[in-house]
Image: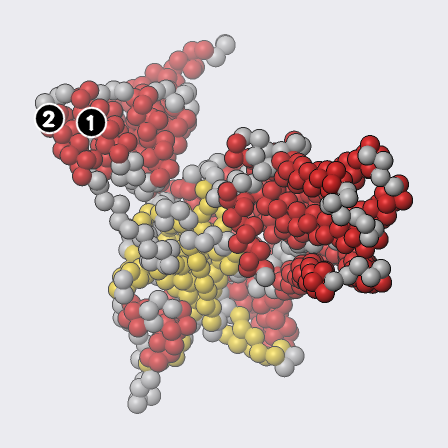
C-alpha cells in the first residue's frame, strides 16, 4: 500500500504540484463523507430520492463538484498554468518544491518558512475540507428553503452532514500529516546540518486525538449501519457497498496512523544509536503529534548536554596530553596506572576518528589496527598513533570530501598523545569550516594550505618531540578532482580497473612538527575517474615480519608488496588486511582508508559530435589565416551544439584571449574553472584575463592557486608580483618576488620588478608627512 501511495504521490507532484498531490488523496475523504451523507439520508428519510427531490440532489452534486474543484485549485492544481493556489504560503510551497530540483542549497529562511507551512498544512487542509463541506450544506439548505421541502428532513440531513464533515476533515488531516512527513524530515536534516535550531511546532491533533478519531469513526460506521438496517430501507447490495467502503477507509487511515508511529520510532532509535556512537544525535522528528514533539524537545536537551561535554573536549585533550608527556619517564613503573591512562586516552580518541561523509559520489571506509593492546577491567582495548578522519565540507557552494590519514611518531601513549592533539585540531578546523562564512569562500588549495599551516604551528610548539606524518586532502564530490599534500607519509595507492599503482609526487614536506619553509608547500592534484578507488595507509602496511624457519627476524623492505595486496583484495579493506596477515605479522600500527569515487556510475564518454568536430576543424583553418572573427563564430556555434565538450571550451577561451576579448573570455572562464578545476593552464590564463579586465582580486586568487600547485611557475610568480604592486600590497609583492630567486632564469624581468618595487617604496616614503 505504501509503495502504491508513493508512486501516485510522486506522479502527481511531478506533473502538477506537491500540495495538490496531498489534496488528491484528501478528496477521497470528501468521497467517503458524501458516501456517509448519502447513507444517512437514505436511512433516515425513506422518501428521499432523486425523483422526489431532484433540485436537492442536483444542487448537492453540483456543490460537491464545485467543492472538489475549489479544494483542488486552492492547493495548486493549476500550478502548471502559473497559478499556484489561493494562499500565498501554498503558492510559495509549490514553487519551493519543484519537481526534480534539490533543496539542499536553499536559503535558511526559505527552508524555515516552508517547513512551517508543511507543519501547518494538515491543519489548513482540514479547515479547507470543513469550509467546502459547509458550502455544500448551505447550498442544500437554501435549496430546501426555496423549494419548500420539509424542514425536519433538513435537520436529519444536518446530522448526516456532521458525520460527513467529520470523516472529510479527519481524513484530510491524517493524509496530509502522513504525506508531508518525509519532506519535513528532509528540511529538518538540512537545517540541522547547517547548525540551525529547528522549532518543534506540533499539529492540532495529538497521537491520542488521532486514536480517538479512529475509534469514533468505527463507532460512527457501526451506528450508521445499524440505523440503516433498523429503518428497513437496506438492500444487500447497499449494505455490502457500505461495509466495503467503510473497510477500505478504515484500513487506509489505520495503516497511515501506525506507519507514521513506526517510522517515528525508527527515527528515535537511529538518533539514539548516533548519539551513543559519537554522532550528533540529531532528531528531525517525522511526527507532528504533540507527544512525539515533546519527546523530541527533551531528547534535544539531552543532546545539548552531550554537546557541551564535547565542546570541552579540546581542553581535556590538552590537559591529558600534558599529563602524558610528564609521565613518560615513569611509565614502566606505573603499569596499573598506565592501563587506566591507556583506557581513558582510547576513549578520547574514539570521537575524534570519525567517518562523517554525506555525499553520494564519494564513499569512504576505515580500518585501524593499533599494535598496542591492553586489558582494563577485564576488557581488551587498543591504543596507538594512527588516525583516520573524513568529513563533507562546503567551499564556494561545492561539496568536498575531506580526508586525513596520519601516523603520530612514538609508541603507545606518545603516539596516542599526538593523535589526540591532531584529531582535536582537525575537528576544530572542520567545525570552523562549516560555521565561518569567510572560510567557506576559500578555494580548495587555500583551505588545505591554511589547515596545514595551522596544524604545523601546533606541533612546532612541541620542539620536535611529537612528530606526525600524514596525507591530507579534499576531493570535489562532483568532478572528482583531488587536492592533496603528503607530509612524509607512505604513498597513496590508486586502484583503477584492477591495477594498483602508487600516486607519487615531488613534495618536500616533512612531518608535522619539523621546521619547514613555506617554499616547500605544494598542493598536488589528481583527477579521479568514475570507479577509481584510493587506498591510503600508514607505514604499518609495509612493516611486516615474515614467518621463517630460522630465529633471525626478516622484515619486509619491498614497498611494492602493498600494491599486490591491494590487487589481491580488489580494493576491499578487509580483504587487503587479510592478505597482509597471510604474509606475516604486523610490527607497527596499521591504518587503512578506502575512498571510492562514483563506483556505481556508468557515465558514457563525452564524444564530440560530428557537426562540432567539423566546426572545430573549420575554426583551426580560420585561425591559421587569422580570420579570428570567423573562427570565433565557428567555435561559439560548436559550443552551442556540444556545450559539454571540454576541448571546444578550451579552444574558444584561448581564441577570445588572443583576440583580446577579455570580458567574454572572463565570463567563459568563470564557468569553465568551476567545471574543470584541474586544468592548471586555464587557471593561469584566467589570472591573466582577470588582470586585463581589472578584476585584480580574482586574478590574485587564481595566481595563488597556481603558486600552491606549482611553486616553480616563474611567469605566474612574476604576474603575482605585478598584481600585488597594482593593488598596493608591497609586503606581498616583495615576498613573492623573493620566491623567484629560487628559480634558475634570466634576471632581466626580475630586475625590472625590483626597480618597480624600489620606486613604489620611495613613493610611499615621500608621501609620509615629515
Residue found at the far front of this picture = 51
Q: Residues within 10 Å of mark 2 (few under 14, many from 20)?
A: few
Task: Indicate the position of residue 8 as horizontal and vertical percent values.
Answer: 54, 52
Q: Secondary structure at mark 2?
A: helix
Q: How many other residues sit within 10 Å of disc 1, few (<14), some (14-19) or many (≥20)?
A: many
Q: Which numbered disc, 1 or 2, marks the residue that appears first in the sequence?
A: 2
* Front residue of this view, candidates 683 and 445: 683
Q: Position of residue 651 (x, y in %)?
A: 22, 32
Can you tell which mark lies on residue 624? 2
Quadrant position of residue 263: bottom right
Q: Could you tell me which secondary element the residue under label 1 belongs to?
A: helix
Residue holding disc 1: 634
Is 323 rendered above or below residue 137?
below
Question: Alpha carbon of mark 1 to alpha carbon of mark 2: how far?
Answer: 14 Å
Above/below status of 449 relative to 566 = above
Q: Quadrant of residue 492?
A: bottom left
Please tell me which residue lies in front, 292 or 480: 292
Residue placed furthest toward the bottom:
549
Q: How is the image coloured?
A: secondary structure
Tell me, for residue 182, which label it has, or none: none
Q: Nearer the viewer, residue 467 or 702?
A: 702
Q: In the rendered structure, are the residues bearing label 1 and label 2 in contact, judged by CB atoms less than 8 Å apart?
A: no
Q: Can residue 563 be seen in the rendering of this structure?
A: yes
Q: Is residue 183 left or right of residue 507?
A: right
Figure label count: 2
For residue 516, say whether it is visible: no
**Residue shown at 30% from the left, 25% from the top:** 665
Q: Position of residue 314 (x, y in %)?
A: 62, 54
Image point (74%, 56%), residue name: 292
Amino acid at each position: 500500500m505504501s509503495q502504491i501511495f508513493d508512486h501516485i504521490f510522486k506522479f502527481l507532484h511531478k506533473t502538477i504540484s506537491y500540495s495538490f498531490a496531498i489534496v488528491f488523496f484528501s478528496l477521497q475523504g470528501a468521497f467517503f463523507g458524501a458516501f456517509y451523507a448519502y447513507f444517512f439520508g437514505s436511512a433516515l428519510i425513506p422518501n428521499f430520492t432523486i425523483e422526489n427531490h431532484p433540485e436537492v440532489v442536483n444542487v448537492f452534486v453540483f456543490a460537491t463538484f464545485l467543492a472538489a474543484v475549489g479544494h483542488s485549485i486552492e492547493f495548486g492544481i493549476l500550478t502548471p498554468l502559473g497559478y499556484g493556489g489561493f494562499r500565498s504560503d501554498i503558492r510559495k510551497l509549490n514553487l519551493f518544491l519543484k519537481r526534480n530540483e534539490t533543496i539542499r542549497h536553499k536559503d535558511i529562511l526559505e527552508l524555515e518558512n516552508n517547513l512551517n507551512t508543511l507543519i501547518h498544512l494538515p491543519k489548513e487542509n482540514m479547515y479547507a475540507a470543513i469550509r467546502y463541506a459547509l458550502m455544500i450544506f448551505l447550498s442544500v439548505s437554501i435549496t430546501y428553503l426555496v423549494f419548500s421541502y420539509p424542514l425536519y428532513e433538513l435537520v436529519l440531513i444536518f446530522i448526516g452532514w456532521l458525520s460527513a464533515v467529520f470523516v472529510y476533515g479527519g481524513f484530510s488531516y491524517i493524509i496530509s500529516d502522513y504525506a508531508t512527513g518525509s519532506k519535513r524530515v528532509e528540511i529538518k536534516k538540512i537545517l540541522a546540518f547547517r547548525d540551525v535550531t529547528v522549532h518543534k511546532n506540533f499539529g492540532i491533533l495529538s497521537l491520542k486525538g488521532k486514536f480517538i478519531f479512529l475509534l469514533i469513526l468505527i463507532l460512527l460506521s457501526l451506528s450508521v449501519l445499524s440505523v440503516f438496517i433498523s429503518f428497513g430501507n437496506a438492500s444487500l447490495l447497499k449494505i455490502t457497498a457500505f461495509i466495503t467502503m467503510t473497510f477500505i477507509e478504515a484500513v487506509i487511515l489505520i495503516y497511515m496512523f501506525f506507519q507514521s508511529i513506526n517510522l517515528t520510532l525508527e527515527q528515535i532509535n537511529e538518533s539514539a544509536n548516533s548519539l551513543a556512537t559519537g554522532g550528533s544525535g540529531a532528531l528531525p522528528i517525522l511526527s507532528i503529534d504533540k507527544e512525539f514533539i515533546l519527546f523530541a524537545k527533551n531528547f534535544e536537551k539531552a543532546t545539548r548536554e552531550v554537546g557541551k561535554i564535547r565542546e570541552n573536549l579540546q581542553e581535556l585533550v590538552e590537559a591529558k596530553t600534558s599529563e602524558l608527556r610528564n609521565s613518560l619517564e615513569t611509565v614502566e613503573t606505573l603499569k596499573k596506572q598506565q592501563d587506566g591512562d591507556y583506557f581513558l586516552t582510547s576513549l578520547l580518541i574514539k570521537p575524534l576518528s570519525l567517518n562523517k561523509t554525506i555525499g553520494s559520489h564519494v564513499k569512504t571506509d576505515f580500518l585501524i589496527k593499533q599494535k598496542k593492546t591492553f586489558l582494563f577491567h577485564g576488557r581488551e582495548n587498543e591504543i596507538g598513533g594512527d588516525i583516520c578522519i573524513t568529513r563533507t565540507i562546503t567551499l564556494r557552494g561545492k561539496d568536498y570530501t575531506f580526508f586525513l590519514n596520519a601516523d603520530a611518531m612514538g609508541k603507545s601513549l606518545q603516539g596516542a598523545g599526538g593523535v589526540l592533539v591532531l584529531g582535536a585540531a582537525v575537528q576544530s578546523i572542520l567545525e570552523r569550516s562549516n560555521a565561518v562564512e569567510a572560510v567557506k569562500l576559500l578555494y580548495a588549495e587555500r583551505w588545505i594550505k591554511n589547515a596545514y599551516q595551522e596544524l604545523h604551528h601546533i606541533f612546532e610548539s612541541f620542539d620536535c618531540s611529537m612528530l606526525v606524518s600524514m596525507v591530507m586532502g579534499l576531493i570535489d564530490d562532483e568532478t572528482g578532482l583531488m587536492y592533496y599534500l603528503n607530509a612524509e607519509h607512505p604513498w597513496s595507492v590508486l586502484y583503477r580497473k584492477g591495477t594498483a599503482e602508487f600516486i607519487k609526487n615531488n613534495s618536500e614536506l616533512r612531518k608535522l612538527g619539523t621546521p619547514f619553509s613555506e617554499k616547500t608547500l605544494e598542493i598536488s592534484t589528481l583527477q579521479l575517474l568514475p570507479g577509481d578507488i584510493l587506498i591510503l595507509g600508514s607505514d604499518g602496511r609495509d612493516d611486516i615480519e615474515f614467518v621463517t624457519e630460522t630465529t633471525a627476524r626478516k622484515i619486509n623492505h619491498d614497498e611494492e608488496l602493498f600494491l599486490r595486496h591491494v590487487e589481491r583484495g580488489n580494493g576491499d579493506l578487509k580483504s587487503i588486511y587479510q592478505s597482509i596477515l597471510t604474509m606475516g605479522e604486523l610490527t607497527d600500527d596499521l591504518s587503512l582508508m578506502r575512498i571510492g569515487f562514483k563506483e556505481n556510475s556508468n557515465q558514457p564518454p563525452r564524444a564530440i559530435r560530428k557537426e562540432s568536430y567539423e566546426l572545430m576543424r573549420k575554426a583551426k583553418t580560420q585561425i591559421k589565416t587569422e580570420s579570428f572573427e570567423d573562427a570565433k563564430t565557428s567555435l561559439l556555434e560548436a559550443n552551442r551544439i556540444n556545450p559539454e565538450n571540454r576541448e571546444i571550451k578550451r579552444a574558444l577561451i584561448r581564441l577570445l584571449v588572443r583576440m583580446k576579448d577579455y570580458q567574454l573570455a572572463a565570463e567563459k572562464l568563470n564557468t569553465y574553472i568551476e567545471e574543470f578545476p584541474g586544468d592548471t593552464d586555464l587557471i593561469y590564463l584566467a589570472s591573466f584575463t582577470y588582470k586585463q579586465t581589472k578584476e585584480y582580486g580574482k586574478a590574485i586568487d587564481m595566481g595563488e592557486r597556481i603558486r600552491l600547485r606549482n611553486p616553480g611557475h616563474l611567469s605566474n610568480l612574476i604576474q603575482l608580483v605585478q598584481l600585488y604592486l597594482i593593488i598596493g600590497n608591497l609586503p606581498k609583492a616583495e615576498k613573492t618576488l623573493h620566491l623567484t630567486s629560487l628559480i634558475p632564469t634570466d634576471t632581466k624581468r626580475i630586475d625590472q620588478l625590483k626597480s618597480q618595487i624600489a620606486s613604489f617604496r620611495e613613493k610611499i616614503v615621500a608621501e609620509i608627512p615629515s
